Amino acid sequence: MFPVRPRRRRGRATTLVAVVLLALTLSPVHWMVTASLRPAEGPWRDGWFPADPSAAGYAAALHEQGGHLVTSLVVSLGTALLSLALAAPAAHALALRPIRGAGAFLFGVLLLQAVPGVTVANALHGAYADAGLLDSHLGLVLADSTAGVPFAILVLRSAVRAIPREVVEAALLDGAGAVRLFRSVVLPLSRNALITSGVFAFLFAWGDTLFALTLTTSDAVRPVTLGVYDYLGAHSTRWDATMATAVLASLPAAVLLVVAQRHVTDGAARSVRSGRSTTHGSPSPPR
């Protein structure tokens, strides 16, 4: 007989540690939500919960930051769509086509991930000034895609390489060309990876501050990550509106992750499995 009590004690200790870590992780969220319901003068009053909650902060945030939220939504959706439109064909070609220099190209994609964002932003500012793309939705979409496209290529290439060779060869024997193979085989079987790449490209753009700060100079095209600074002043801070804006800015990302959680988990797991098989020597893709 194995001892039961030590296992139960270890299980209870593990549960207690998990609960403590979860409480520490969620404490900023609790402070943000409760501060958005308290008076603007001080979010630390009334203990853990507001004694007289008020929605004045949310009313001010919606009235003053509504346009910025729409800008963030447009830019983030545009970044996700553009990243997938560019990365999916590139991943298909890199995974299934005998392209000379594919290894060097992938190394360049990885290298792009290591380039500091401030370097890219400064380079884009001069180019945008000449092209007239400053203070434009298109300019922010293109800038944010510099982070979304490389990530999407790496994830989608792993997913395409994980497609069984038999499926690809059967489609080729049926007379499928490159376009039909991509449309009818690669895209449906890479759905989880497509959703994963799109979600992360959306999140990259939604949380961006550097490109927004560098490539916009007016309120016409200003995402919510910069709009929140309107409430932070040297002499007074509108904590209720600031925290309400933070809550509203967190909702789209949270909802997106909850809705796409299963697809994101499956896509990440397949990418890891494909990476391991490639490391241990998987068969070469069909040619």
Image: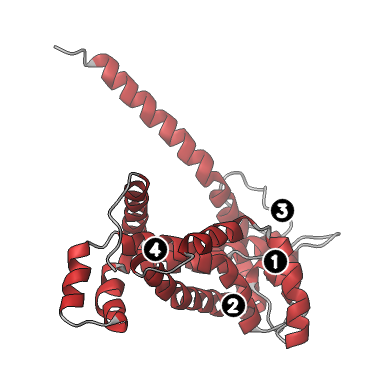
Spot occupied by residue 170 in the image (x, y as percentages of width and height): 16, 72
SS label for mark 2? helix
Q: Is residue 77 visible?
A: yes
The quadrant of the image that shows the C terminus is bottom left
What residue is shown with label 4? 157
Q: Nearer the viewer, mark 4 or mark 3?
A: 4
* Label 1 crowd bin: few (<14), some (14–19), many (20+), radius 10 Å: some
Residue at 36%, 70% in the rendered image:
97
**Could you give the CA–CA distance between mark 1 and mark 3, rounded to whole angstroms?**
39 Å
At label 2, which amino acid type do we have? Answer: Val
* Label 4 crowd bin: few (<14), some (14–19), many (20+), radius 10 Å: many
Query: Which mark sits nearer the N-terminus, 1 or 2?
Result: 1
SS label for mark 1? helix
Q: Residue 120 carries which label?
A: 1
SS label for mark 3? loop
Q: Can residue 251 be seen in this view?
A: no
Query: Which mark sits nearer the N-terminus, 4 or 2?
Result: 2
At label 1, which amino acid type do we have? Answer: Val
What residue is shown with label 3? 42
What residue is shown with label 2? 141
Spot occupied by residue 173 in the image (x, y as percentages of width and height): 16, 77
Q: Which of marks 4 and 2 is in front?
A: 4
